[in-house]
Amino acid sequence: MKKIMCILVCGLLTVGTLTGCGSSSSGSSSKSTAASESSAGSDSAKKDLSGTITAAGSSALKPLVDDAANSFIEKNPNVSITVDAGGSGEGLKQVAEGTVTIGNSDVAAADKLDATQAATLVDNQVCVITFAPIVNEDVKKAGVSSLTTDQLISIFTGKTTNWKDVGGPDENIVLVTRPDSSGTRSVFTKYALNGNAEASNTSMETDDSGVLLQNVKSTKGSIGYVALSYLTGSSGVEAVSINGVAPTIENTYSGKYKVWSFEHMYTKGQPDDVTKAFIEYIQSDKYGSQMEKLGYGVATKMTVTTH
């Protein structure tokens, strides 16, 4: 009898032990599965936004779009963004034709495209850009730190050809110019030259702001114009005031400096989800402080919205 009781007790203990192990194993497996699901959920959240964005156009806007693209991709690794220059007119043409996702422009689409093409595009205003006349360092050192509107018109239309006539050195003025497709040229002509047609120097004509800056830097007696975004570091050229007003973001915000425009990122029709998210990222308050560091203005800080 004792032997039978012993066998029964041992059997019950064995069942209890096995049952306990089963519970522990089940709990561990459940916990592991939950962690795995959580990890998968986190990964999928990062991968929700995906797609390809291609942008072309304004070289003045390119540094900002490049910077925004890099930080946007860090947050959204499944997004691919390619940014090219080519000028506002070219960017608008390409987006209207559907060969790029975004057309970056210094000017309104209607200024560069016919009405039918322009009507197919959706305007996304992203920032304010200020354009400054720039001269070779030798011109600034010789005393040219500010030019009047009349002097600028005379220089860029080819009437004034020597710096001594505007208080500078006895040195020929070399124009570094932009092609007709350039949005930067359109803005500068309208607001710095009062609409007077700029003389073209075909030997030093470029629609790449970086190339223009280098040409002014390396050519004595030269003058051109670029966006402030190209003058945030040690550029090797000197910005010139207009009518005594320096080309700064602060003077643009206040309305004192007149040579500026809103920057546009056009899409053909409403943008897809990934393009919309990218544009909204650039327009966000969070990106605004970075925008100013790069030499661009935040549109909502403008005290004037027309010239």
Image (spheres, rainbow, N blue to C red):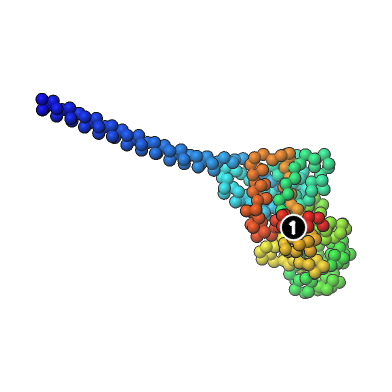
Where does the C terminus fall, quadrant-wise? Answer: bottom right
Q: Is residue 178 at all visible to an observer of this figure?
A: no
Q: Which residue corresponds to the image point at 81% horizontal and 73% vertical from the top-left?
A: 168
Circle 1 is placed at which residue position?
A: 302
Please give the count of numbered marks on the rendered protein: 1
Front residue of this view, candidates 293 and 209: 293
Where does the N terminus fall, quadrant-wise? Answer: top left
Q: Whole-percent x and y of residue 216?
A: 75, 63
Label 1 environment density (alpha carbons within 10 Å; few <14, some 14–19, many ≥20): some
- Label 1: element kind: loop
Q: Whole-percent x and y of residue 25?
A: 33, 35
Q: Is residue 254 above or below residue 104?
A: below
Q: What's the amino acid at mark 1?
A: Met
Q: Which residue corresponds to the image point at 75% horizontal and 42% vertical from the top-left?
A: 122
Q: Which residue corresponds to the image point at 63% horizontal and 51% vertical from the top-left?
A: 68
Q: Is residue 249 above or below residue 106?
A: below
Front residue of this view, candidates 174 and 243: 243
Front residue of this view, candidates 239 and 272: 272
Q: Is residue 107 at all visible to an observer of this figure?
A: yes
Front residue of this view, candidates 231 and 276: 276
Q: Whole-percent x and y of residue 224?
A: 78, 62
* Residue 300 location, quadrant: bottom right
* Residue 206 location, quadrant: bottom right
Q: Is residue 5 above or below residue 230?
A: above
Q: Whole-percent x and y of residue 30?
A: 39, 36
Q: Which residue corresponds to the image point at 66% horizontal and 55% vertical from the top-left?
A: 288
